[in-house]
């Protein structure tokens, strides 16, 4: 046997590695095609990895066998990674300047898909009722009375309880655990009778269906809240399924999946596959395999669903395409909406972007003819858009120690008297954003971050929302020792809930905040209670703004409409307009008339003026022109470079050395370094540079040239690059 090793294949390990490594093919193994999953050793660890492909002009290396390691195992039972996924991984890595191995890691996020299927167990109602009956247990017994074998998570979701309730009923013998049959995928029926569409919806659906047949094209479905955008793009999904293709719907919030899956079931006769972080590992593995084998016809998921191994994708829908949740900022920084368009282009697959408040990037693309623009300007059936008014807090301030103006309180009382629901919106979690001592002025600051500790009175603790550190609320000031001297400054949703309880003690209340409803089952149960009118007043953060349908909601009060406008962020006006439009759009979605009140100290601000006047077009025209004049996205390119270290001087010095290494370029500006607004996070000192360039600039080529010439980062120093940044903290 020759000492050289022609029987090698490139293998990409899902780590921060820039390229595949060559490995020996096991003796006697069949040829390994690109996309085959294998177990490969790297150092002392064995990794599940993927056989990659060589560039067409590259020959296998002539390396002595003694210098190569052999593949440990070939995972023949795992579906191969389709070629389109490898194309997509390389494109994303090239665009984001990330190692291809890290993109592959996102594509392999279902570890159970690469292991033999584990036995699964369900529960069935067999025993007598438990001795201790609770409302939650009663709902479980009612759901399970048909005697069928239930998947535990599905029974918990159907009954609106936590898995712990199910476990308790198993322990007491009311439910019994039994082995479930193997996974199966229910077929969807695209010909199932659809909802009755209005003339405007029918025309929009016809356009989408026509575009779906054309291969790659991007359509912006631009419809006001409550206009029935979902039912319209369901027709495009039906067209893709009828053609034997797979479809993907991306949504920004996993709490929305339950209601969305129900709507899909009503339209197609079965629930689609779902993909998000709340699924068990076994469920994720099942969905991953079903997608790779082409058995999952329709997938509804969070942004990471875009990296599932679809071999036959025929449509991608990005719902609430404007939402900031589609931007990932850690490890591989990418904008899922934009990457969905790339995935569609690579796979000749049509894209639907749906929103009531489109991103400026998408709207400009539609105006310039890159995207097809399909507007929906009327709400479905008899529903009307809510009327909005600004409450000038300078003229009608709240009582001392309160946060709700007399105007809003009176409107709430009138709404409740009519038996209708109220929503109070404040995009600030916890009880108060700052706690201080009235005796010495001491402020509770996170020891790991340059941020205040937020008081969460319901859980009796102070918490940092950046690193997660928490501590109990002390009885005395840790600085001066004064007792009963701690004062909460400013409101969070918990403090608003406290005021509501004092003013409307008979009203049924619910708080929607990720702090108080961290589990998906709890959040979905709260949503069910609101939809079924078991709640009179909802107090919520941005969780309430995303796609919910509350039939009884008549009044939306925005407690602090100015909150998002105070940030030094190029997208602050756009985000505030979108968020407040979305949250006020929850009101009056059926026969009830809707009304929105915006508490503000700046009623003259253009964003507030546009919202009150209902003049969306004026706001977008003004914001687009401002972006154009400033050369900001989508008319220019931005790149954020973040340098961090556990020593401030080291971070600053390295950031300055990076700035000095920037190649000269006539049209490219390098701004900074400057200390980040959040100067310390998780004990790391942070300095930022911002690169600004014209739209046509090959910014990736410039950055590669630059990064090749910077000094090597040593010790705790880290450098990260964010192409098209959304956060400037």
Image (tube, rainbow, N blue to C red):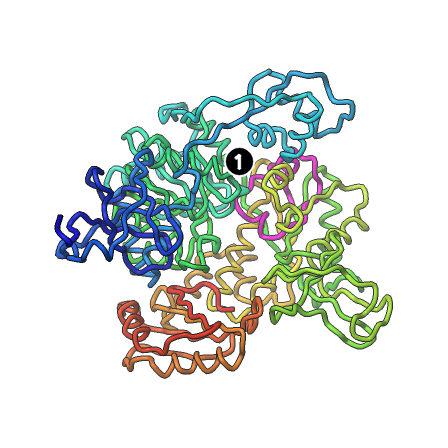
The residue lying at 56 percent from left, 66 percent from top is 565
User: Does residue 413 sit above or below 55 in this rendering?
Assistant: above
- Residue 339 appears in the figure: no
Image location (x, y in percent) of residue 209: 31, 36
Q: Nearest the camera: 202 or 182?
A: 182
Q: Nearest the camera: 161 or 550?
A: 161
Residue 154 occupies which quadrant of the picture? top right
- Residue 410 appears in the figure: yes
Q: Which residue is mark 1?
A: 259
User: Does residue 169 sit above or below 390 in this rendering?
Assistant: above
The residue lying at 59 percent from left, 16 percent from top is 147
Residue 713 occupies which quadrant of the picture? bottom left
The residue lying at 40 percent from left, 56 percent from top is 335
Say whether residue 574 is magenta.
no
The residue lying at 59 percent from left, 28 percent from top is 155
Disc 1 element: helix
Image location (x, y in percent) of residue 590: 57, 36
Locate residue 258 relative to residue 69 in the image: left or right: right
Q: Which residues are magenta?
A: 527-555
Say whether residue 532 is magenta.
yes
């Amino acid at each position: 046997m020759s000492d050289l090793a022609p029987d090698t294949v490139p293998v990409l390990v899902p780590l921060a590695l820039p390229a595949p490594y060559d490995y020996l093919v096991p003796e006697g193994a069949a040829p390994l095609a690109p996309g085959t999953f294998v177990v490969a050793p790297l150092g002392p660890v064995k990794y599940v990895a993927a056989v990659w492909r060589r560039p067409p002009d590259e020959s296998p290396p002539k390396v002595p066998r003694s210098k190569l390691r052999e593949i440990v195992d070939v995972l023949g039972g795992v579906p191969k990674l389709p070629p389109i996924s490898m194309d997509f991984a390389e494109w994303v890595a090239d665009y984001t300047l990330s190692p291809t191995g890290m993109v592959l890691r996102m594509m392999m996020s279902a570890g159970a898909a690469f292991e033999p299927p584990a036995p699964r167990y369900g529960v069935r109602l067999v025993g007598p009722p438990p001795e201790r009956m609770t409302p939650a247990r009663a709902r479980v017994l009612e759901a399970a009375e048909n005697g069928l074998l239930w998947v535990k998570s599905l029974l918990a979701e159907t009954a609106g309880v936590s898995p712990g309730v199910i476990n308790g009923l198993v322990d007491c013998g009311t439910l019994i655990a039994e082995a479930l049959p193997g996974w199966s995928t229910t077929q969807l029926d695209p010909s199932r009778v659809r909802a009755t569409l209005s003339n405007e919806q029918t025309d929009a659906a016809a356009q989408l269906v026509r575009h779906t047949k054309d291969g790659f094209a991007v359509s912006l479905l631009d419809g006001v809240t409550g206009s029935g955008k979902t039912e319209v793009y369901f027709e495009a999904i039906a067209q893709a399924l009828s053609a034997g293709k797979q479809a993907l719907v991306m949504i920004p919030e996993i709490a929305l999946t339950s209601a969305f899956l129900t709507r899909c079931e009503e339209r197609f006769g079965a629930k689609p596959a779902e993909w998000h972080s709340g699924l068990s590992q076994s469920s994720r593995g099942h969905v991953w395999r079903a997608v790779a084998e082409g058995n999952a016809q329709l997938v509804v998921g969070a942004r990471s669903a875009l990296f599932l191994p679809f071999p036959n994708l025929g449509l991608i829908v990005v719902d609430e395409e404007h939402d900031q949740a589609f931007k990932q900022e850690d490890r591989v920084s990418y904008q899922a909406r934009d990457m969905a368009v790339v995935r569609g282009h690579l796979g000749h697959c049509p894209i639907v972007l749906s929103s009531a408040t489109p991103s400026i990037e998408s709207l400009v693309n539609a105006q310039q003819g890159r995207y097809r623009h399909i507007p929906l300007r009327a709400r479905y059936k008899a529903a009307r858009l809510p009327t909005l008014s600004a409450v000038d807090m300078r003229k009608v301030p709240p009582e001392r120690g309160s946060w709700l103006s007399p105007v809003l309180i009176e409107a709430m009382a009138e709404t409740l008297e009519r038996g209708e629901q109220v929503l109070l919106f404040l995009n600030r979690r916890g009880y108060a954003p700052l706690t201080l001592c009235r005796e010495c002025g001491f402020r509770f600051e996170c020891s790991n971050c340059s941020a205040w500790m937020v008081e969460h009175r319901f859980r009796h603790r102070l918490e940092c929302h950046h690193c997660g550190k928490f501590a109990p609320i002390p009885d005395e000031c840790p600085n001066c020792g004064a007792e009963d001297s701690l004062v909460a400054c400013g409101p969070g949703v918990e403090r608003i809930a406290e005021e509501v309880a004092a003013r409307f003690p008979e009203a049924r209340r619910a708080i929607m905040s990720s702090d108080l409803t961290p589990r998906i089952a709890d959040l979905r149960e709260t949503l069910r209670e609101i939809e079924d009118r078991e709640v009179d007043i909802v107090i919520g953060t941005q969780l309430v703004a995303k796609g919910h349908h509350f039939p009884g909601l008549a009044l939306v009060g925005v407690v602090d409409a100015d909150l998002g406008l105070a940030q030094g962020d190029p997208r602050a006006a756009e985000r505030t307009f979108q968020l407040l439009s979305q949250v006020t759009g929850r009101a009056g979605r059926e026969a009830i008339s809707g009304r929105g009140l915006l508490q503000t100290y700046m009623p003259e601000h253009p964003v507030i003026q546009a919202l009150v006047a209902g003049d969306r077009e004026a706001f977008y025209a003004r914001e687009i022109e401002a972006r154009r004049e400033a050369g900001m996205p989508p008319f220019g390119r931005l790149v954020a470079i973040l340098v961090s270290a556990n020593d401030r001087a080291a971070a600053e010095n390295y950031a300055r050395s990076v700035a000095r290494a920037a190649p000269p370029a006539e049209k490219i500006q390098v701004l900074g370094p400057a200390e980040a607004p959040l100067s310390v996070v998780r004990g790391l000192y942070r300095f930022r540079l911002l690169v600004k360039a014209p739209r046509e600039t090959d910014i990736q080529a410039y950055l590669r040239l630059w990064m090749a010439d910077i000094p090597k980062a040593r010790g705790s120093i880290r450098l990260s690059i964010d192409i098209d940044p959304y956060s400037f903290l």
